[in-house]
Image: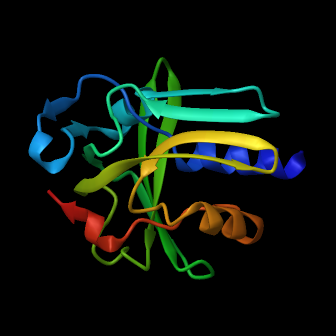
Amino acid sequence: MKKGVFVLSIIILMLLLFTCGCTQQDDSENGGKTVTMTARELQNDVSSDTDWSTYYTMLYTSLDDGDSLIIQDTVSNISYDLDTGTTTLTFEWIEDGENNSLALYFEGNITITYQPGDKVKISVKIEYVKFSYEDFNFELEIYEEQWVSEEYFKSNTDSSGEGIKPLPQSSIEKE
C-alpha cells in the first residue's frame, strides 16, 4: 500500500497539468489537434480522481490521445541534478493568493542554454495509457516522449520513483 501511495504521489507531481484560455488549431491530418497553453493553464486543465487504494485517473479536459501540446511560458527556476543526469525546469505563478508551480524534467544538463526569465516553448504529444500496478489501476494521458512502456514504468518506479523518463532536450526551445 505504501509503495502504491508513493507511486501515485510521484505521478501526481510529475504530471501536473492544463486549463482554459489556450489556443487550439485543428491538426486532423496529423492525428489530432494542436493546443498551446501556459504552465498554469496546463495544470488547471487536468482532471484527476482517485480513491487512494485502487485507482488513479488523470485525463485532460482539452486534450486527447494523439493531440500535440505546446507549453509556452517563462522559466522561473532551473537546476541540474548530477546524480540523475536530469535538469528540472520550473514554472511558477500565484493563483488565488497561493504559490503554484509546474516542474518538468529533461535529459542531461540544459542549464547553460536555459536560464530563469527565458521564454520557452516545449512541444510534446499526448498519449493515453491504461494499466495496473501494485493493486492500482491507472488511466492516464501523459507525454508520449516520457512513456516507454508499462514494463519500464514498473521496473523504474521501484528504483527511481518515477516510472517515466525525462523529456528529451529536443522537445524544448527558446522563443
Numbered label tally: 0
Q: Residue at x 33, y 34 (%)?
A: 63
**In the rendered image of this protein, does residue 146 appear above or below residue 69?**
below
Image location of residue 40, percent across then percent down: 38, 33
Image coords of residue 97 (percent x, y): 50, 20
Determine whether, in the image, residue 106 is placed left or right of residue 1.
left
- Quadrant housing the C terminus: bottom left
Q: Measuring from the top left, give residue 134's x and y in whole percent.
A: 81, 50
Q: Residue at x 27, y 55 (%)?
A: 122
Left or right, 104 with respect to 157, comes to left
Q: Quarter of the image holding residue 149?
A: bottom right
Q: Is 77 or 30 nearer to us in this picture?
A: 30
Residue at position x 48%, y 32% from top? 59
Between 25 and 109, which is closer to the camera in this rendering?
25
- In the orientation shown, which residue stands out farthest toward the top? 96
- Which quadrant of the figure has residue 108? bottom left
Question: Residue 53, relative to residue 67: is it above or below?
Answer: above
Colour scheme in use = rainbow
Residue placed furthest toward the right: 1
Q: Is residue 25 left or right of residue 140?
A: left
Work out whether 81 lies above or below 13. below
Is residue 83 rendered to the left or right of residue 173?
Answer: right
Q: Nearer the viewer, residue 121 or 116?
A: 121
Q: Residue at x 32, y 72 (%)?
A: 169
Image quarter of the N terminus:
top right
